[in-house]
Image (spheres, rainbow, N blue to C red):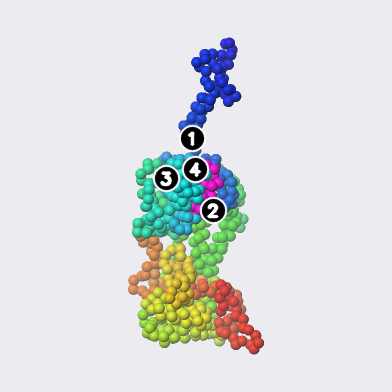
C-alpha cells in the first residue's frame, strides 16, 4: 500500500487516459468530467501567449495570391528589416512609427500585418487613411484588406463577409469583437470626422492634400482622433516627394532616423546600403570602412545579421525608419542601375526631369531636390548667337505657342532638333481687335507661313498650342473649330498648376464647341524649361537664342523667360511649392515656351525620319500633288499624328 500511495502522489492529477481517479477516501473521489470542465474554463480565462506583431504574422498571416508574388504563409525572415518596424508597435515607449521608404520593400504588407494583429490579438478601434476616398481607400479595402481577411483563418472568423446582411460591415467599415477598422480618404472631411480611434495608419502621406476640404491638415485631423487613448499608436508611411514639401521627410527627421545596416562581409563593420558606393561596371558596393568592392549577393547574405542604427536613439517616442530598394530581396541592383541610366538619359538627352525625380523617390526613398542654380538673365543674354538663316542647321521640327491678350496675339516659333535641343526662331506680336474675325485670320495666315534654311529648303509649323483661358475664350473656341475643320494641328490648351501634374496631363472636350483642349501641367513645363536653360553645352536639351534684333529675342524676352521662381509657402500649416512672378517682369515668354514645348510633346516625332527628309531638301509639311491614278500616302510620326 505504501508503494501504491507514493506512485499515486507522484502521478499527474489528471491523465487523459484515466476515466475515474480514486483516492483512499471516497469523499475525495473526483469525476473526470468535472476536471475536463475546469480544464476548458482555464483555456478560456488564461491570457493569450505574448506575441509581437511580427510573431503574430509569422504564426497566422497568410499572403493572398492576387496581391503577392509569393502567396502562402508570411515569413518575416524573407525581409528581416521589416521585423523591427512591426515590433516597434509593441514598444510601450513608442507612440509613433514613421516609414520613409522606396517602393518594393513591402510597406503595404507591414500596414496589413498591423491591422491583422489588432483584429485578432489586441482588438481596438482603427482608422486607415488613404490619400483619396475614391478610388484609393476603396481599392485598398477590396484589393488588399479583404483578401487578407479571407485567407487568414484567425481573421476570417472574426470579420464577417460584407455580403452578409447581418455582418454590420461595408467596404469602408468593418467590425469585429472588441473593435472596428474604418478606411477613409484624406480628401474627405466626413470620412475623417467620426468616432475616436486608438490606432491610426496613414498611408502615402506625401500624396495627401494640404487640406481636407475646409477642415485643414488631414494629418492633424486624424491625430486628434487618438487623444482619448493613453496607449494610442500612430503609423505614418510614404514614399517621399519634393524637398521642402515632403511630409514624410519632415516626420522622419523629427524621429529616431533609423537606417537598416548590415555587416561588411570582409571587415564586419555595420553600414547602410548607399547608392554613391555602388559601382556600375561590376555591380558591387564599396565598403565605407575597408574599401573592398563586394558583390550584391554577398552583401544581401548579411541581411539576416542586419540591424537598425538610430541617429537619435533618445527620441524613442517617435521611431522613424528609412529604407531604399537596394535592401529589397525583390529587386536586383543590376535592374536598379539600368533604371537609373534610363532616367539619366531622359534628363541629359531630353531635358526631362520627371523620370529622375521618380527614380530618386521610388528607388532611393529620398526627396527630389533641384540643387542647380537658376540660369540668370546675363548668362542667357550672353549665349545669344547670330543666325544666318530663318531656320538654323540642326532644326528638324517647328512648333509655335500663342498667347491671347486683350489687344494682341503674342507668338513664339521654336525649332527642335535631336534630344530636344531647341532654337528660338521668332517672337512676334499681332495687334488687332480680338472680337473681329479678321484678327484671327491674320493669326492663321501667320501660322501658315513657310520658313527657310540657308540651303533654300523650307519648313512649316508642325503644331501650335494656343491658350484659351483669357478674355476671349469663346472667340478662341470658334477659331479652333474652324482650324479643326481644316485638319490643322492647332490645339487649345489650359494650364493647371500644382506639383506632380505632367506637362501633357489630359485632353478635354468639355466646352460648347467640343474642340480638343489639352490640359497642361504648367509647373512641370516650367521645371523642364529651367532644367534645360541650365545646360551649358550645345547638344541635347540646350536652348539657343538669336541675337538678330528683328527676331524678337531681346532683353525683355530673356527677362520674361526667367520671370518666375519656385518658392515654398505654407498653406493650412503645410508647405506647398508655387511659382511666383518676379516683380516688374512679364511672363508671356515663359508661358509661350511652355506651350511650344507642349506642341512638340504632342507630336513626339521620329527625328531620324525628319532628319532624312530635311537632308533630302523635302519640306515634309507640304502636301505634294497626287499622281494620277495613285493615292497620296502621308508620312507617319509617332502618336498616330501625320506631318
**Image quadrant assignment for residue 206:** bottom left
Front-most of residues 79 and 233 = 233
Residue ID for mark 3: 125
Query: Could you tell me which quadrant the C terminus lies in?
Result: bottom right
**Marked residue nearer the N-terminal end (1 or 4):** 1
Give, as a single range, the part of the protein colored magenta: 140-154
Front-most of residues 486 and 105 = 486
**Marked residue nearer the N-terminal end (3 or 1):** 1
**Marked residue nearer the N-terminal end (4 or 3):** 3
**Looking at the image, residue 291 lies above or below residue 477:** above
- Label at residue 428: none
Instruction: Please tell me how crowded label 2 is: few (under 14), some (14-19), or many (20+) other residues with Cα within 10 Å.
Output: some
**Image quadrant assignment for residue 153:** top right
Task: State left or right for residue 634 relative to residue 142.
Answer: right
Q: Residue 150: within the magenta?
A: yes
Task: State left or right for residue 369 relative to residue 8.
Answer: left
Residue ID for mark 2: 104
Task: State left or right for residue 445 relative to residue 73.
Answer: left
Residue ID for mark 1: 48
**Looking at the image, residue 309 lies above or below residue 240:** above
Residue at x 49% of width, y 61% of height: 357
* Majority secondary structure of magenta residues: helix
Tag in front: 2 or 1:
1
Amino acid at each position: 500500500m505504501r508503494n501504491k500511495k507514493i506512485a499515486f502522489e507522484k502521478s499527474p492529477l489528471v491523465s487523459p487516459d484515466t476515466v475515474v481517479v480514486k483516492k483512499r477516501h471516497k469523499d475525495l473521489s473526483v469525476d473526470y468530467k468535472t476536471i475536463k470542465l475546469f480544464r476548458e474554463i482555464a483555456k478560456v480565462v488564461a491570457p493569450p501567449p505574448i506575441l509581437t506583431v511580427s510573431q503574430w504574422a509569422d504564426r497566422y498571416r497568410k499572403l493572398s495570391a492576387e496581391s503577392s508574388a509569393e502567396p502562402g504563409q508570411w515569413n518575416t525572415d524573407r525581409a528581416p528589416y521589416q521585423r523591427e518596424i512591426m515590433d516597434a508597435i509593441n514598444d510601450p515607449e513608442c507612440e509613433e512609427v514613421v516609414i520613409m521608404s522606396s517602393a518594393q520593400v513591402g510597406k503595404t504588407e507591414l500596414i496589413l500585418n498591423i491591422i491583422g494583429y489588432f483584429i485578432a490579438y489586441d482588438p481596438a478601434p482603427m482608422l486607415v487613411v488613404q490619400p483619396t476616398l475614391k478610388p484609393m481607400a476603396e481599392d485598398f479595402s477590396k484589393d488588399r484588406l479583404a483578401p487578407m481577411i479571407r485567407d487568414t483563418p484567425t481573421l476570417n472568423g472574426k470579420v464577417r463577409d460584407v455580403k452578409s446582411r447581418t455582418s454590420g460591415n461595408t467596404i469602408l467599415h468593418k467590425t469585429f469583437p472588441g473593435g472596428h477598422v474604418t478606411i477613409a480618404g484624406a480628401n474627405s472631411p466626413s470620412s475623417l470626422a467620426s468616432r475616436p480611434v486608438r490606432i491610426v495608419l496613414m498611408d502615402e502621406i506625401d500624396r495627401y492634400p494640404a487640406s481636407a476640404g475646409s477642415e485643414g491638415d488631414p494629418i492633424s485631423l486624424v491625430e486628434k482622433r487618438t487623444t482619448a487613448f493613453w496607449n494610442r499608436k500612430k503609423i505614418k508611411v510614404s514614399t517621399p516627394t519634393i524637398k521642402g514639401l515632403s511630409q514624410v521627410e519632415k516626420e522622419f527627421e523629427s524621429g529616431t532616423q533609423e537606417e537598416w545596416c548590415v555587416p561588411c562581409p570582409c571587415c564586419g563593420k555595420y553600414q547602410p546600403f548607399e547608392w554613391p558606393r555602388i559601382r556600375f561596371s561590376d555591380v558591387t558596393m564599396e565598403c565605407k570602412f575597408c574599401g573592398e568592392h563586394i558583390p550584391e549577393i554577398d552583401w544581401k547574405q548579411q541581411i539576416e545579421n542586419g540591424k537598425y542604427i538610430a541617429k537619435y536613439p533618445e527620441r524613442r517616442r517617435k521611431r522613424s525608419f528609412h529604407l531604399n530598394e537596394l535592401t529589397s530581396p525583390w529587386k536586383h541592383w543590376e535592374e536598379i542601375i539600368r533604371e537609373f541610366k534610363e532616367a539619366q538619359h531622359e534628363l541629359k538627352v531630353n531635358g526631362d526631369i520627371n523620370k529622375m525625380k521618380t527614380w530618386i523617390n521610388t528607388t532611393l526613398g529620398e526627396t527630389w531636390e533641384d540643387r542647380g542654380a537658376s540660369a540668370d538673365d546675363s548668362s542667357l543674354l550672353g549665349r545669344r548667337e547670330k543666325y544666318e538663316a530663318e531656320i538654323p542647321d540642326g532644326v528638324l521640327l517647328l512648333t509655335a505657342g500663342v498667347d491671347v491678350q486683350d489687344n494682341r496675339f503674342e507668338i513664339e516659333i521654336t525649332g527642335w532638333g535631336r534630344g530636344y535641343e531647341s532654337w528660338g526662331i521668332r517672337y512676334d506680336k499681332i495687334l488687332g481687335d480680338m472680337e473681329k474675325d479678321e484678327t484671327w485670320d491674320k493669326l492663321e495666315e501667320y501660322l501658315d507661313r513657310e520658313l527657310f534654311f540657308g540651303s533654300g529648303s523650307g519648313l512649316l509649323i508642325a503644331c501650335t498650342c494656343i491658350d484659351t483661358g483669357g478674355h476671349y475664350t469663346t472667340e478662341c473656341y470658334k477659331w479652333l473649330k474652324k482650324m479643326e475643320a481644316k485638319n490643322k494641328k492647332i490645339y487649345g490648351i489650359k494650364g493647371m498648376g500644382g506639383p506632380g501634374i505632367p506637362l501633357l496631363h489630359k485632353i478635354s472636350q468639355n466646352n460648347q464647341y467640343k474642340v480638343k483642349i489639352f490640359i497642361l501641367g504648367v509647373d512641370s513645363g516650367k521645371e523642364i524649361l529651367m532644367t534645360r536653360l541650365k545646360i551649358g553645352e550645345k547638344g541635347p536639351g540646350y536652348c539657343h537664342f538669336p541675337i538678330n534684333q528683328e527676331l524678337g529675342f531681346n532683353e525683355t524676352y530673356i527677362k520674361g523667360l526667367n520671370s518666375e521662381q519656385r518658392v515654398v509657402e505654407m498653406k493650412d500649416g503645410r508647405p506647398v511649392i508655387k511659382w511666383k512672378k518676379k516683380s516688374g517682369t512679364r511672363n508671356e515668354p515663359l508661358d509661350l515656351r511652355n506651350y511650344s514645348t507642349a506642341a512638340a510633346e504632342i507630336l513626339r516625332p521620329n527625328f531620324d525620319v525628319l532628319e532624312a527628309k530635311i537632308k533630302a531638301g523635302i519640306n515634309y509639311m507640304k502636301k505634294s500633288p497626287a499622281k494620277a491614278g495613285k493615292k497620296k500616302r502621308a508620312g507617319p510620326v509617332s502618336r498616330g499624328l501625320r506631318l
